[in-house]
Image (cartoon, rainbow, N blue to C red):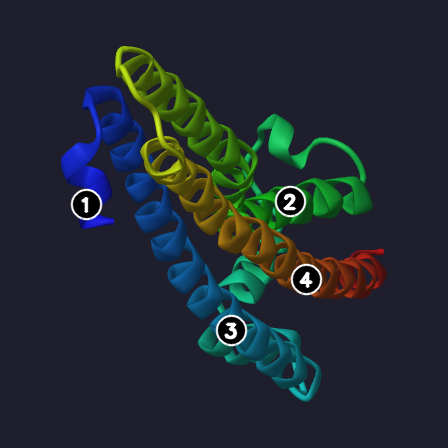
Amino acid sequence: MWHFWLTADLLSRILAAVLLSMSMATWVVILWKAWVLAQAGSSVRKAVIAFWQSSEFEAGCAQAAHWDKDVGLLLKASVLPVSGTLAVAGSVRARLTRALREALAASSRRLQWGQTLLASVGATAPFVGLLGTVWGIYHAMTGLGQAADLTLDQVAGPVGEALVMTAMGLAVALPAVLAYNFLGRRASAIEAELEGFAHDVLELLACREA
């Protein structure tokens, strides 16, 4: 890789720097998101269990908020506003549905953070590497075309170095694609659990307010 960097031209170095930046950003997102989802998956389950094991709604809210932020936001959103604004317009079920939907959307944005970056890197990194390979081969062939006598070593060396860019692009893209699929499924599972809990809370509060 160091020999490739020393022999590469300006465009190849720029593309290699872009791939390196993509790789660093990808691994930062993967490590951070994996930690966040691992914590969220455990805390959501504990918060839901703590809520339903409480004897009163207010006590359950306090216990759930202690274990998980997202569950706490859902329960906080279930407290209907009392001011004379449009927020209190409609039936009790409609107001509860609107409040819980907004809380779920906020939780979803946090859980889905970084997915766009992983998808973008997974889709574009191979083409960045391919562009570097094409440019490297063109650059190598142009230089070889000016040589008087060509041997196999003279052709294979520059072409092989150009193919390094394709390998770099794939090395950046594969972790991003795998992490996008795995972490996306994990986030979706947590969102489904939150949606189910929100539905149960909606039914509980609708019966209480009826």
Which one is earlier in the sequence, the residue at label 1 or at label 4?
1
* Most distant residue in the left direction: 6
Quarter of the figure with residue 158: top left
Assign a secondary structure to mark 3.
helix
Q: Which mark is residue 40?
A: none
Q: Looking at the picture, tell me which residue is in the foreground, 21 or 155.
A: 155
Q: CA distance from mark 3 to mark 4?
A: 15 Å
For the residues labelled 1 and 2, say whether their Cβ atoms are less than 8 Å apart: no
Q: Which mark is residue 194?
A: 4
Q: CA distance from mark 1 to mark 4?
A: 52 Å
Give neighbour class at mark 4: few <14, some 14-19, many 20+ (Cα, 10 Å): many
> Relative to 188, does residue 65 appear above or below in the rendering?
below
| Residue at 65% in and 77% down | 48
Which one is earlier in the sequence, the residue at label 4 or at label 2?
2
| Residue at 46% in and 51% down | 171
Q: Give how far across and how far down residue 119 sits, in percent.
A: 56, 40
* Residue linked to disc 1: 3
